[in-house]
Image: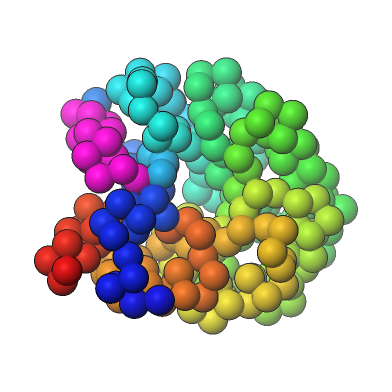
Amino acid sequence: MTYKDLTPEKLASYFDHTQLRTFAVRKDFEILCSESKKYGFKMVAINPAPVKMCKELLAGTSIHVGAAVGFPLGQTPIEVKRFETIQAIDDGADEIDYVVNQCQLKDKNYTYIEKEMHEIVSYCRSHNIISKVIFENCYLTQQEKEELCRIAREVKPDFVKTSTGFGTGGATLEDVTLMKRLVGDDIQVKAAGGIRTLDTALEMINAGVTRIGSTASVKIVEELISRL
């Protein structure tokens, strides 16, 4: 696929338009939701606290509200992540992006990782909510990425996701290609972190990504518009 194969509307539908800064104020969320309505982004990606606000700002649209759970470190107990998930859904979240517990992963406690994933994914599934598992690949070995993909194949979240955007690195073509190959067609792949140009977005889409998390969503769609 090249940029000539895309319309601005089609490109926008790949994007989870993101505002996860700790110092964001109401005006920032109003801008986020206004831009999402203008361009037709798939989702706004936010922390759990402003879910109700964004749900109200996006009322009457098909744009999803996505809550980040255990974000950005993943270092809360399963019970806390589950509670965050339940609260976010009660507040109106349509999607949940949660961060895996990397300490448990690095200790090879795969039973814990599977239980955590099952708890969150099964609750989302029972409420018709989209679930995404954030790996944070910049801190992982090849084996750890492969183990997460193996567990995901068993639990079947809707998406596996490369990064939070808060780590030492973001999405890479190598990681996206690996994740897509290992999870197959039953699970989608979301790329996030460092995607700031149209060419990078196209690389990710051509590698099999169906969602892109970015703060540069508007810039990327405007870049396409300028080329057409």
Left/right placement of residue 188 relative to residue 66 reads: right
Q: Residue 9: horizontal and vertical position, in percent?
A: 30, 52
Q: Quadrant of residue 57?
A: top left
Q: Is residue 146 above or below residue 27?
A: below
Q: Quadrant of the C terminus?
A: bottom left
Q: Depth check: 62 or 83 in front?
A: 62
Q: Depth check: 77 or 62 in front?
A: 62
Q: Residue 1: horizontal and vertical position, in percent?
A: 40, 76
Q: Residue 141: horizontal and vertical position, in percent?
A: 66, 76
Left/right placement of residue 103 relative to residue 34 reads: right
User: Does 40 lie within the magenta span?
Assistant: yes
* Residue displayed at 58% across by 77% down: 177
* Residue displayed at 47% across by 56% down: 211
* Residue displayed at 62% across by 53% down: 159
Left/right placement of residue 4 relative to residue 212 reads: left
Q: Quadrant of residue 37?
A: top left
**Which residues, given as a range, are shown in magenta?**
27-41
Q: What sort of colour scheme is used for the picture?
A: rainbow
Q: Quadrant of residue 160?
A: bottom right
- What secondary structure do most residues of the magenta stretch adopt? helix
Total residue callouts: 0
Furthest residue to the right?
A: 111
Left/right placement of residue 137 relative to residue 213 reads: right
Furthest residue to the left?
A: 226
Q: Is residue 141 above or below residue 91?
A: below
Residue 207 can be seen in this image = yes
Residue 78 can be seen in this image = no
* Residue displayed at 76% across by 51% down: 156
Q: Is residue 51 above or below residue 22?
A: above
Q: Depth check: 2 or 65 in front?
A: 2
Q: Residue 129: horizontal and vertical position, in percent?
A: 62, 33
